[in-house]
Image: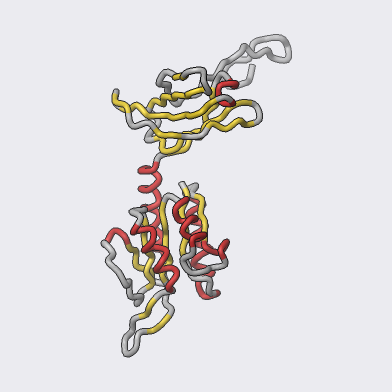
Amino acid sequence: MRVFLSFSFRDDDKELVERLQSLLRSHGVGSRTGRVADGEPLTPAVQGMIDECDAVVALMTRRDKLEGQERWRTHPWVRDEINYARNGEKPAIAILEDGVEPEGMYAENERIHLDRADPLDAFLRLSRQLASWKKGFGRTVKARVLPDEIGHEADTCKYRFWTDGHSGDWVDAPLIPAQGGTELLIRGVPDEDALIELQVDRQGNGGWRSRAIGQYVTIELQQAIGRAGGEVPPGGRP
């Protein structure tokens, strides 16, 4: 899973951003930011980064104080980035510093209130949201595809999951002619009990298809011999 982290590039927000990035890493979640694009407004480059991510987390801190009110607007590019994600129906959540005017329709489960002086509650809520997203998106599994030569001659490749005796939709995916053999990244694996089925069409040579297989590892044991020639019992000590 990968998240686009939207935030201002002010020094005042640097510590909060570092904590957010640390929280994402603790969940095994990768992140991208607009810093690669120099914090520009919503350019095609930034849109492309958001499109490539699974979800968006927007840190909406105070910027411009509203006249006569104890309310603030946030940074316009942060607002635009999360609105772009929502318009594309991408999962997104706003972390709103106290006093920030949302400037849009936000369901209660799409925003988290942040007390800068005591941010623990906000970070705990975000942690629960990340766990929920990860469960919904599923895991990514790397598979070795055999025989090796199939992947080098494949036109198309697709996989699907079987859960509770029912098959899901086919998902297109590229085969990778990696060092040591042909590999496939299977994304969105729903749970450890799901079976995986693969279908490959070769260039002018018809199609190949696998059986639905489980996500377990086969481990072959061999009898170990101790220093004195005796067998080593379980636990490794004679």
Closer to the camera in the image, 34 or 63: 34
> In this orientation, does residue 117 appear?
no
Residue 191: name its quadrant: top left
Residue 115 x %, y %: 39, 71
Closer to the camera in the image, 141 or 207: 207
Q: Residue at x 66, y 30 (%)?
A: 179
Vertical order, 121 against 196 (above or below): below
Residue 136 x %, y %: 35, 43
Q: Is residue 195 left or right of residue 238?
A: left
Residue 189 x %, y %: 41, 35
> In this orientation, does residue 110 appear?
yes
Q: Residue furthest bottom?
A: 68
Q: Where, quadrant-wise, is the C terminus in this rendering? A: top right
Vertical order, 130 against 194 (above or below): below
Closer to the camera in the image, 178 or 30: 178
Residue 163: name its quadrant: top left
Q: Residue at x 53, y 74 (%)?
A: 10
Residue 173 x %, y %: 47, 34
Closer to the camera in the image, 203 or 174: 203
Q: Residue at x 48, y 23 (%)?
A: 201
Q: Residue furthest front?
A: 204
